[in-house]
Image (cartoon, coloured by chain):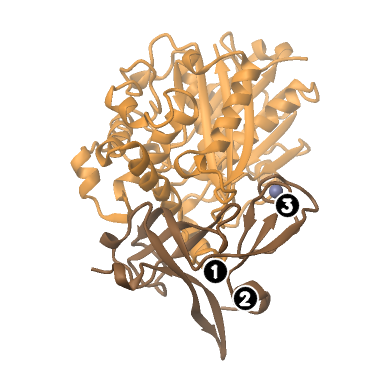
Chain colours: A brown, B orange
Amino acid sequence: MSGPRYHRTRRQDQRLVGFECQACGFVSFPDEKRICKRCGDAPAEFRDVDLASSGTIKTFVVQEYLPDDIEVPQPLAIIDIPQADGSGEPTRVYGLLTETELDEISVGCTVDVRFRELFDEGARPINSFKFSVPREDKR
Amino acid sequence: MTDAHVVGAGIIDFGEKYDWSFEDLLEGAYLDLVESVDYGIDPTNDIDGVWYGTLDIANEGSSGAAVAHATGLFETPATHIVNACATGSDAFRNAVQAIKAEDIDVALVIGAEKMLDSTEGLIGGAALERLWRGRGVTMPAFFGMRATRHMDQYDTTREQIAAVSVKNHENGTKYPHAHQQFECSVDDVKESSTVSYPLNLYDCCPVTDGACAVLVASDDRAREFTDAPVRVAGYGLSTDSFQRGDDLALTNFPASRHASSTAYERSGYGPDDIDVAEVHDCFSITELITYEDLGFCEQGEGGSHIDEGIPHLDGEQPINPSGGLLSKGHPIGATGVAQIAEIFEQLRGEAGDVQVPDAEVGMQHNIGIGRNATGAVSCVNILER
Ligand SMILES: [Zn+2]
C-alpha cells in the first residue's frame, strides 16, 4: 500500500480540526479544500473550527463481504460531529466503528471519535479517525 | 428544432458471458437492432453518429472506435460516454441532444459491459481507496445506509424492502432476456446471506454481462424506419454528494429528484402521467426510495406504496416489468440502454408477457455512485407513444 504523504502529515490528521465555509456554514473534515462542497463558492473562505470528541450516528451498515485483508463483520456509519463550542453546523463523515457489536449501535446513538494507527506503511504509521461506542455504554 | 424518436432496439440475453468478448457483445446487440428495425436500415449510410456507453470494467473498449470495429461503422463519429451507473442512459441523452440540435439525423446508442472479467472489482476499488473517509465503503454499504435510516425514520419494514426484490424477480421470470429467472419470497430474501446489514444477497442485483442498442432519429427520418416511433419527451441529468450535510440525502437520492423534475418540466408530464417505468434497482432499497424521488408517492411512503401493489405488473403504475436490475442484471454500460429498449417495446405494445396495457408515457431512470462513494449522478428520460 502506498498512499501519498499528505495522508500522514496533514495537520488535521493529528487532531479534530474542521474547516467551516464562511459563505454557507458547511464544515469540511478531514479535508481542507479551497472550494465549498455545498454552496460551490470558489474560492471559498474557510475558517478552522475545533470539533467535539464525540458524534452522533446518522445511519450505519455492517459489512460482511470485503477483500481478504479487511476484517469482517465491519460496522460502518455516517456520523455527524458537532463543533466543540456548540456553535454552527456539525460535519458529516464516514467512519469505521471498532470494538463494537451490531446490537450496540443504532441511529441516533453517540460514539467517541479518536485517532489511532489504521495500519502502517513500512515503518511509517498511517493515522486516521475511528469511532467506538463509549466504554461506559457497553453492555 | 426537431424531436428525437426511438425507432429500433436490439438486445442480447443478459447473463454470464465468459466466452463472449466485448466485441461479441457489441456485435450481438447491434445485429439484433439491424434485424429488428421495422422497415430495415442501411447501417453505413443511415447512421450519422454513435454514442457508446461502457465503464469498460474489463479494460477492452475505452473508445468509440471499439464500436466502429465491432460494427463496421467506420468513418462515423463515435463517442465513448462514461457516467457511473447512469452511463447507458447518459449516452442516450447525448444522442438525443445531438439530434435535437439538428447536428445529425440518425444516432446509434449502444451500451455494453463485461462485469465478470473485472480483475479488481468494484468492492476492491471502494475498499482500498480514500482511507480516511472510512476504509471500505462498498456499494451495498452505501445503499444499505439509506435502508437503515429509512427504516428508522419512516418505520419502513424489512419486509417492505424485500417485497421489491420479490416483485422484480417475479417479473424477470416473464422477461426473456433476464439473467436470473427464478421467483423468491420475502422469507427467501430475509434468509439469504447478509451482504451488508441490513441488505442480504437477494436484495442485490447479480453480476451480469450484457449489451443493448437503440436507434434514434429526427422528425424527418423517423418514419423511414417505422410507423410507430417513440418520441423522447424530456430528459434530465443531475449530480449530488452524500456529504454535503443535506439530511434528505440520508434517506433519498436528491439527484433523482432534481433530474426527474427537469425531465417532467421539459416533457410537460408529471409523475401521475407515467404509465410504466424502468428504474434503477441495483438494490431493493434503491427502488423503494426511487418511488419517492420520482414523485410516485410521498416521501417516506415507499413502503406502503409497494404494500398496496401499485408498482406490481398488474398494479396502477408498474415499475420494472423487465425484472429490473435485480433480476435482469446490471451490466453497467448496457443497463440504461436496455431500460430505454424496454420502454420502447412497452409503448409500442410489443412487451410480450410483461406488457403493461395501454402504456402511452414511459420513464427510464438511472442512478450512479462514484468509487469514493460520495458522488451521485442521476439520469432520467421520458418517452411517449
Ligand atoms: Zn459553502
Residue B107 in sight in this render: yes
**Dot 2: chain letter:** A
**Dot 1: chain letter:** B
- For label 2, the residue is A3
Label 2 residue SS: loop
Q: Is mark 3 within 8 Å of ligand 1?
A: yes
- For label 3, the residue is A22
The picture places residue B5, in percent across and down from the top left corner, at 64, 18
The picture places residue B67, in percent across and down from the top left corner, at 65, 42
Q: Do labels 3 and 1 share a chain?
A: no
Confirm or deny contact between disc 3 and disc 1 (CB under 8 A).
Answer: no
Residue at 31% x, 27% y: name it: B304
How packed is label 3: few (under 14 Cα within 10 Å), some, or many (20 or more)?
some
Earlier along the polypeptide chain: callout 3 or callout 2? 2
Eyeballing the image, is A25 above or below A84? above
Which quarter of the figure is the N terminus of chain B placed in? top right
C-alpha gap between disc 2 and disc 1: 9 Å
Label 3 residue SS: loop
Quarter of the image where one finds residue A92: bottom right
Disc 2 marks which amino acid? Answer: Gly
Question: Residue pushed farthest bottom?
Answer: A123
- For label 1, the residue is B131
